[in-house]
């Protein structure tokens, strides 16, 4: 075949034009909404990270991968729980996969590592990580969090311990990371304001192989508050039983201390432990009544903190998409829709304050045996809990961020 | 042939931001940073015969020092960088005094212990290092008024530093001093008998390696704008060491190739393979079994065997 030069040029120009025109056309019609999930699938945080992915996949499967009439494409990235990798993976999702929004990351330090990048790239992010300042003093405008800050669930628990359980003297013990510090600080604040006294604060390292030395130095108190993450709460309770202290000291837990993910490996020693969380697999409400059994049927265990987190974030995402008519290209409008979301989810009603943090229910739960397995039964609901609890937001934000030493503990006995 | 190949590589490297996407440019920047780190470690592992498992100390310390100086002392980027590199080099001098009391396994353990001390401090001395929350850097420096915020600009900056680092380290090992260094690696007792101060040669190399480790740390923190204790952990040191060994210790190209391979496996392949750790393991297993001397010398051997026509 003979091909004149002119035809060739025409052909190339035509192909070029089509190539230029095609993406815009696609965007208008059937292009999927690309959602990036930042999770942890390798390393010590992997069990929670895998739950995050499973629950999100489940939500999308239930909806036929279509939210608000638009196809949704999920791209999962494994950050391995390392901040530098979290950053690279975020860049990959944004720059290579062109995601429209992010769900995750899991850990507070990952969120802090990608904070400025999210601002710069302007990527709406539905976070699972609890880092306080991301929605407080250094509120990131591209950040919403439908789970909770570290101390959001600890505030009501402090009040509950002092008022309803009548504890006077308590010990706090938590992982020596920001999450543990912030949670203990919130607990200490409301517990002491309601007349209790924190007589001892302990912070074992995150990877403490053995809690014996810590248990040996426990002071005489009514109860101990566990601010552990991962499987540490489970290991601590087991050692407490071995040391014969379980009956002398009531155990109270933060939102990940006796998560459903570790509860399934525990025995009768867990019975009666009171914990706080924004979710319980046992929470009796229409959406959760479908979600929890379906998750259990599929994977053989109850959904916990991490599974509920992405399942809830997905519901928020869907509600926001419905609000914008499925449009995500106008990032500012989409972000505004996310923040204006009011939606019923598996954890109960969710809405956001102006900093992008959830205002929602917090449940006080107690471990009981139900149908032969241990569950966190809801015994009290605190509705519409904000990250500022009952304090004035401005005054709250003027004070330093919760830490190991703030608010100061006035009643420590040494 | 060799010059052509080198020139071609240089042209491709320099023009990368013109044709590659942002993600790939950033990936290339990360490879260059990891390559400087591996090259500096290679001075010890490959040329001095001292296997260190604590090289992350220099990277992490320099990164922390500059981030801390910028945020807490309010220093500009240049004085902060100067301060950070100076203190890192001084630290390397002190660490060298301690670690070089031993060679072999003893040296490895001491460097490991020293880096673990720093790692522990970064985690626990929260008032200084912000503990597990890490330190955030406000932005990237703008040397001579050129902003480095864009991926391309930062890549060129890293490439320039890399070129300088590569050249200076190449000069270092091919100089007379470098020959003496290789002598201390192969025949330390004979070198001592010949009147060389073996300890001093090793110590100078240690400090020099620490200096370049610090430079890699600066680039690292500018790139990520965030530093967390994991950057000081044994994993970071071990990854550097793996890169050196995989690429071929004692060669100049080896650590660059090895570090590149590692970054690609960690950050690129992991998007496609869930069990990328396993892939990493297989790749290293392959290297150990087929080309135990490392990729660069190994490939050279395989090629020359093919070229000479011998089986």
Image: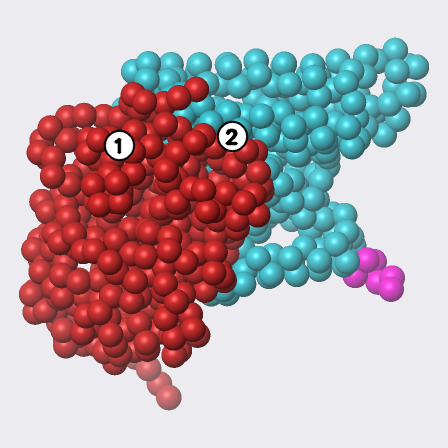
Chain colours: A red, B cyan
Question: Along the line of sight, which residue is nearer the eye, B233 or A167?
Answer: A167
Question: Along the line of sight, which residue is nearer the eye, B311 or A188?
Answer: A188
| Residue behind mark 1 | A196
- The residue shown at (34%, 43%) is A108
State which quadrant residue A34 falls in. Answer: bottom left
The chain that hosts pointer 1 is: A
Locate residue A300 relative to residue A400 in the image: left or right.
right
Indicate the position of residue A277 as horizontal and vertical percent values.
Answer: 28, 53
Q: Is residue A167 visible in this depiction of the protein?
A: yes
Q: What residue occupies the far bottom of the structure in this picture? A: A1
SS at mark 1 in the image: loop
The chain that hosts pointer 2 is: A
For the residue carrying disc 2, how many other residues have a C-alpha within 10 Å: few (<14), some (14-19), or many (20+)? few
Indicate the position of residue A76 as horizontal and vertical percent values.
Answer: 37, 63
Locate residue A64 relative to residue B294 in the image: left or right.
left
Q: Disc 2 versus disc 1: distance between alpha carbons?
A: 21 Å
Relative to A246, is A36 above or below? below
Classify the position of the N terminus of chain A by image quarter.
bottom left
- The residue shown at (17%, 62%) is A348
| Residue behind mark 2 | A217
SS at mark 2 in the image: loop
Which portion, as a residue range, is magenta?
A: B305-311
Circle nearer the N terminus (2, 1): 1
Question: Along the line of sight, which residue is nearer the eye, A184 or B228?
Answer: A184
For the residue carrying disc 1, how many other residues have a C-alpha within 10 Å: few (<14), some (14-19), or many (20+)? many
């Amino acid at each position: 075949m003979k091909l004149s030069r002119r035809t060739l040029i025409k052909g190339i120009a035509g192909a070029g034009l089509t190539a230029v025109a095609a993406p815009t056309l696609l965007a208008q019609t059937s292009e999927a909404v690309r959602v990036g999930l930042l999770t942890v699938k390798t390393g010590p945080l992997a069990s929670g990270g895998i739950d995050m992915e499973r629950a999100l996949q489940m939500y999308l499967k239930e909806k036929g991968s279509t939210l608000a009439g638009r196809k949704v494409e999920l791209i999962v990235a494994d950050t391995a729980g390392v901040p530098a990798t979290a950053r690279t993976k975020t860049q990959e999702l944004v720059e290579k996969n062109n995601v429209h929004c992010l769900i995750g990351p899991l850990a507070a330090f990952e969120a802090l590592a990608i904070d400025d990048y999210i601002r710069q790239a302007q990527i709406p992010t539905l976070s699972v990580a609890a880092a306080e300042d991301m929605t407080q003093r250094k509120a990131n405008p591209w950040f919403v969090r439908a789970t909770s800050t570290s101390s959001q669930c600890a505030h009501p628990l402090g009040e509950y311990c002092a008022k309803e359980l009548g504890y006077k003297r308590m010990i706090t013990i938590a992982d020596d990371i920001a999450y543990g510090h912030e949670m203990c600080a919130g607990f200490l604040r409301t517990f002491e304001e309601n007349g209790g006294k924190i007589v001892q604060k302990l912070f074992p390292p995150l990877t403490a192989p053995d809690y014996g030395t810590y248990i040996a130095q426990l002071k005489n108190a009514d109860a101990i508050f566990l601010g552990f993450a991962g499987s540490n709460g489970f290991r601590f309770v087991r050692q407490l039983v071995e040391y014969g202290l379980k009956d002398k000291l009531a155990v109270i837990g933060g939102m990940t201390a006796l998560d459903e993910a570790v509860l399934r490996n525990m025995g009768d020693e867990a019975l009666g432990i009171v914990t706080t969380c924004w979710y319980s697999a046992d929470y009796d409400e229409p959406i959760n009544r479908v979600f929890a059994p379906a998750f259990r049927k599929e994977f053989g265990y109850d959904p916990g903190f991490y599974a509920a987190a992405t399942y809830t974030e997905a519901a928020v995402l869907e509600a926001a998409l419905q609000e914008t008519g499925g449009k995500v290209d106008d990032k500012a409008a989409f972000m505004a829709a996310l923040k204006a979301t009011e939606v019923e989810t598996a954890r109960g009603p969710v809405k956001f304050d102006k900093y992008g943090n959830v205002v929602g229910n917090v449940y006080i739960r107690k471990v009981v045996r139900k149908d032969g397995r241990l569950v966190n039964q809801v015994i009290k609901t605190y509705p519409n809990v904000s990250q500022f609890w009952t304090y004035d937001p401005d005054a709250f934000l003027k004070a330093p961020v919760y830490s190991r030493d703030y608010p100061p503990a006035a009643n420590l006995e040494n | 042939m060799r010059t052509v190949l080198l020139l071609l590589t240089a042209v491709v490297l320099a023009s990368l931001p013109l044709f590659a996407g942002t993600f790939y440019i950033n990936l290339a920047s990360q490879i260059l940073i990891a390559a400087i780190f591996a090259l500096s470690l290679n001075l010890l592992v490959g040329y001095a015969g001292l296997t260190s498992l604590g090289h992350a100390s220099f990277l992490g310390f320099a990164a922390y020092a500059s981030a801390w100086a910028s945020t807490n002392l309010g220093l500009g980027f240049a004085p902060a960088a100067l301060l950070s590199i100076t203190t890192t080099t001084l630290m390397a001098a002190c660490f060298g005094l301690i670690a070089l009391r031993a060679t072999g396994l003893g040296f490895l353990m001491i460097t490991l212990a020293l880096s673990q001390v720093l790692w522990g401090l970064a985690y626990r001395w929260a008032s200084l290092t912000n503990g597990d929350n890490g330190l955030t850097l406000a932005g990237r420096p703008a040397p001579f008024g050129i902003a480095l915020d864009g991926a391309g600009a930062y890549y060129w900056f890293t490439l320039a530093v890399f070129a300088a680092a590569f050249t200076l380290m190449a000069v270092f090992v091919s100089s007379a001093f470098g020959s003496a260094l290789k002598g201390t690696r192969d025949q330390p007792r004979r070198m001592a008998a010949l009147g060389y101060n073996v300890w001093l040669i090793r110590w100078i190399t240690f400090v020099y390696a620490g200096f370049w480790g610090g430079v890699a740390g600066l680039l690292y923190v500018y790139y990520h704008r965030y530093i967390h204790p994991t950057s000081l952990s044994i994993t970071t040191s071990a990854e550097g060491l793996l890169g050196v060994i995989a690429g071929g210790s004692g060669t100049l190209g080896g650590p660059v190739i090895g570090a590149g391979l590692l970054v690609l496996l960690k950050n690129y392949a992991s998007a496609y393979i869930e069990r990328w750790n396993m892939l990493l393991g297989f790749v290293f297993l392959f290297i150990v079994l087929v080309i135990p001397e490392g990729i660069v010398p190994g490939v050279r051997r395989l090629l020359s065997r093919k070229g000479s026509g011998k089986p």
